[in-house]
Image (spheres, rainbow, N blue to C red):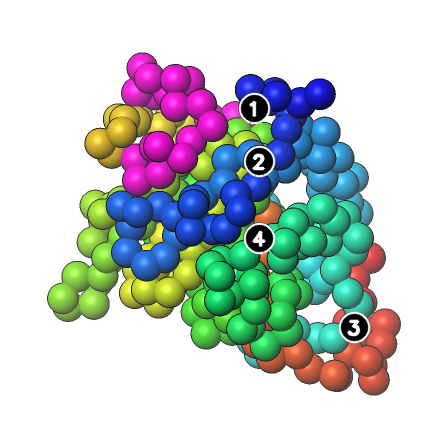
Amino acid sequence: MPTPTDSSAVHLPASLEENKIVALPSCAYYISDFITEEEEHAILRKVETAPKARWRQLTHRRLQTWPSDLVKNALIDSQPLPDWLQQPIISRLLSIPVSDSEPNIFASSPHGRPNHVLINEYPPSSGIMPHKDGSAYFPVVCTVSLGSSLCLNLHRSKEDGTLDPEPVWRILQEPRSLLITTGDLYTDYLHGIDPISVDVNLSEETIANWTLLRSPSQFEDGQHERQTRISLTYRDVLKVSKLGGKLGPLFKRP
Ligand SMILES: O=C(O)CCC(=O)C(=O)O
Ligand SMILES: [Fe+2]
């Protein structure tokens, strides 16, 4: 029988309110044990064995988009997400109430569930520039982390509209965790990952979700050396175009 200390057990809250990151503006939630180690390994195998053409190589990181790239901010409605990206993650996401009056985090999104997944692979020393996710998506971002812990930084824009390079908050994302960001955090703040190999200055004072971590003791020396981390970012793309249905294979990827 799994026990609360079993490293491969899933621990879902009765409602997201229990896992709210209270140090942050509205609104973010962190669940450390969202998937099991077995599920993590199975998803990693699927990511690694995807056809080569699925990967887009950037300078320091590579990514896959499922079911396809957006065209003019719209999803081409050609094929659904593959089963390995739906189970267990989407069903589990939809099973957690936000509060008594909100059955799940996608309850008021146009399609009632995420229809798009971005998979980013970050070798140690790679990151992503601070950015906002923009208007193509319903403002809820669900990120499942695999393989390694690292810090996500949240930044403000300065009064003149330029980026304040000093993060206002940092969120530590452990492997198998789920981070949900929404509300003001989606619209008013930027998020990014520093291109470093060791995350430093980790403590209850500096990490917004410290009390929600699976194993804060792992970081008690204040440092964490990164391994390769894969993230799965689930979102609901607002516009779904029927074009793909008409043109079929043109928009289909391997
Ligand atoms: O990998 C992450 O946690 C962040 C990815 C991200 O910012 C994005 O997909 O827009
Ligand atoms: Fe983003």
The amino acid type of the residue labelled 2 equals His
Q: Which residue is mark 1?
A: 4
Percent position of residue 109, x then y? 55, 72
Instruction: Looking at the image, tell me whether mark 2 or mark 1 is earlier in sequence order.
Output: 1
Q: CA distance from mark 2 to mark 1?
A: 8 Å
Q: Are marks 2 and 1 in contact (CB under 8 Å)?
A: yes
Q: Is mark 1 within 8 Å of ligand 1?
A: no
The amino acid type of the residue labelled 1 equals Pro
Instruction: Looking at the image, tell me whether mark 3 or mark 4 is earlier in sequence order.
Output: 3
From this viewpoint, which residue is outermost toward the left?
A: 159
Q: Which residue is mark 4?
A: 96
Q: Which residue is mark 2?
A: 11
Q: CA distance from mark 1 to mark 4?
A: 19 Å
Q: Are marks 3 and 4 in contact (CB under 8 Å)?
A: no
Label 3: few (<14), some or many (≥20) within 10 Å? many
SS under mark 1: loop
Residue 139, magenta (yes or no): no
From this viewpoint, which residue is outermost toward the front?
A: 100
SS under mark 4: loop
Tell me where the magenta segment starts and ends, as one range.
207-231
The amino acid type of the residue labelled 3 equals Ser
Image quarter where the C terminus lies is bottom right
Q: Which residue is mark 3?
A: 78
Q: Please report the residue visible at 47 percent of the width from the left and 51 percent of the height from the top.
A: 16
Instruction: Looking at the image, tell me whether mark 4 or mark 2 is earlier in sequence order.
Output: 2
**Does 94 sit left or right of 161 as displayed?**
right
Q: Nearer the viewer, residue 250 or 10?
A: 10
Q: Nearer the viewer, residue 153 or 90?
A: 90
**Does 209 sit left or right of 166 as displayed?**
right
